Amino acid sequence: MLFQKNDTVLFIGDSISDYERKRPVGEGLRNAWGTSYVACAGALLGSVYPELALRVINMGVSGNQTRDLIARWQTDVMDLHPDWVCMLIGINDVWRQFDQPQMPETHVLPDEYARNYESLIQRTLPHVKGMVLMTPYFMEPNQSDPMRARMDEYGAIIRDLAAKYRLPCIDLQAAWDGLFQHMHPCNIAWDRVHPNQTGCMFIARQLLNGVGFDWNHCAE
């Protein structure tokens, strides 16, 4: 597995990560991770690999776009000195183009999204062991749907950046497409964005598979 003993693994993103995590820093007692996929991943890492004593921090903020991550990156990432940064961001960069079409100042178009995202990678990589990138998604199986088609553009940007910097990439959109061959998206998220607990666990499972998590591991 990528994560090693005593590593700090920091998750950052938007509402998909947030889910009422503790402020100002999402770690510690009383469900400080919130109830998102971060909590699922953190619980699995701690229970299956207790000997690693991993420190898991959730720094998701609801409503965030890549612009917001740039503004808070120093305090919410670099100052916490993580070993690994797992990033899921981009849904709001796309969503604002569809739920606020008359407000172009809130739209993060593909070129800016790519610049913003790459700047965060370049700023972070010299100071960490690595980063894990996750594609944004829209739970719409119809690839001709305008928002789904737009989201696919942003997912392609993440895959390209992951390849360029040789980083693990978790293609969540492809994973959802597979799941929805067996159920309707509304079974996971009424708005096709914010997953229920089954969906949160599904994201956590994709992430953990992507970092080499051994589901049959036994602590020594």
Image (tube, rainbow, N blue to C red):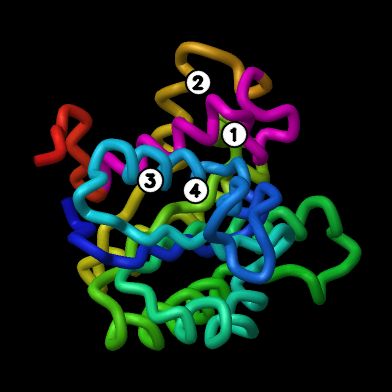
Residue at label 1? Answer: 139
Disc 4 and disc 1: Cα gap in Å? 19 Å
Residue occupying the far top of the picture: 182
Q: Position of residue 6 (x, y in %)?
A: 25, 65
Q: What residue is shown at x 48% (from left), y 86% (from top)?
A: 79
Predominant secondary structure, magenta span: helix
Q: What residue is shown at x 83% (from left), y 51% (from top)?
A: 99
Badge 3: residue crowd in 10 Å (few <14, some 14–19, many ≥20): many
Q: What element carries label 3?
A: loop
- Marks 1 and 3: CB-CB under 8 Å? no
Q: Which mark is residue 38?
A: 4
Residue at label 3? Answer: 171
Q: What residue is shown at x 81% (from left), y 76% (from top)?
A: 105
Q: Where is residue 153 in the image (x, y as percent from the top left)?
A: 50, 56
Q: Which of marks 3 and 4 is nearer the N terminus?
A: 4
Disc 4 and disc 2: Cα gap in Å? 22 Å
Residue at label 2? Answer: 180
Q: Earlier in the sequence, mark 4 or mark 1?
A: 4
The answer to whether residue 146 is left or right of residue 125 is right
Disc 2 and disc 1: Cα gap in Å? 8 Å
The answer to whether residue 167 is left or right of residue 204 is left
Q: Position of residue 219 (x, y in %)?
A: 15, 39
Q: What stretch is highlighted in magenta?
A: 187-210
- Marks 2 and 3: CB-CB under 8 Å? no
Which of label 4 and label 2 is nearer to you? 4
Residue occupying the far right of the picture: 102
Residue 150 seen by the camera? no
Q: What element carries label 1?
A: loop
